[in-house]
Amino acid sequence: MKRITTLLLVAATLLALSACGGKTSEGEVAASSYTDALEVLNKVVAAYDEADLFAIYGGDQENAVMDAPGKFDVSKTEELNVTLGLPESQAANVEDAASMVHMMNANTFTGAAYRVKAGTDMNAFAEEVKSSILATQWICGFPDTLVIINVDGTYVITAYGQKEIMETFKTNALSALQGAEVLVEAPVA
């Protein structure tokens, strides 16, 4: 009986440790299920029904791709800020990035995935991005909703845009990505 109880306690402990935000028992960040930020956004796009998918482009200005997410050069901190809303102060915490933006109007939808460096406080990162986006002076209308999603403790997705498009994007991200959880969901207005 003691042996069974001990085995159950060990199993419960291992289960609890495996659910602790992507960290191992020694405090190191566990390996991600994804190879890069582009793969993260491609998984979300693959979850769309054809009727819900809108015209997009991805990547930075020099490496833009049509009709798909694209890699974003993380050394372009000003472009990350202006195009995607990533505060320049958080750029040092990003190792890899990808983006997808609505072809007709960035305020309709702008999304990005970032692989953050180990040890980055995800909640602080999300709050700083939120503050930056909410402080933006919008031209040609403004987005309705901001969503920031933690993906397996390694990636952060930030997205803002029109309410219905954002709801579909959030639903697809949460269903398509392992370990995805909403950190921030807020109105932009």
Image: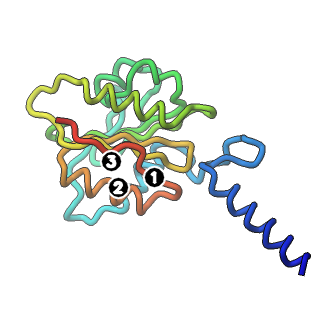
Q: CA distance from mark 2 to mark 3?
A: 8 Å
Q: In this rendering, would 14 be left or right of 54? A: right
Front residue of 114 and 76: 114
Q: What quarter of the picture does the N terminus occupy?
A: bottom right
Mark 1 / mark 3, whichever is N-terminal: 3
Q: Determine whether 137 is above or below 48 in the image.
A: above
To which quarter of the image does residue 3 belong? Answer: bottom right
Residue at horizontal 46 percent and vertical 41 percent from the top: 156
Mark 2 / mark 1, whichever is N-terminal: 2
Mark 2 / mark 3, whichever is N-terminal: 2
Residue 126 position, x and y percent, is 42, 35
Q: Which mark is residue 45?
A: 2
- Going by the numbered disc 1, the residue's amino acid type is Glu
Badge 3 is on which residue? 68
Front residue of 89 and 97: 89
Binning the other alpha carbons within 10 Å of mark 3 as few (below 14), some (14 to 19) or many (20 upward) gives some
Q: From the image, state whether disc 2 or disc 3 is nearer to you.
A: 2
User: CB under 8 Å between callouts 2 and 3?
Assistant: yes
Dot 3: element: loop
Q: From the image, state whether disc 1 or disc 3 is nearer to you.
A: 1
Residue 24 position, x and y percent, is 72, 48
Dot 2: element: helix
Q: Residue furthest left?
A: 140
- Going by the numbered disc 2, the residue's amino acid type is Val
Badge 1 is on which residue? 181
Q: Determine whether 22 is above or below 73 in the image.
A: below
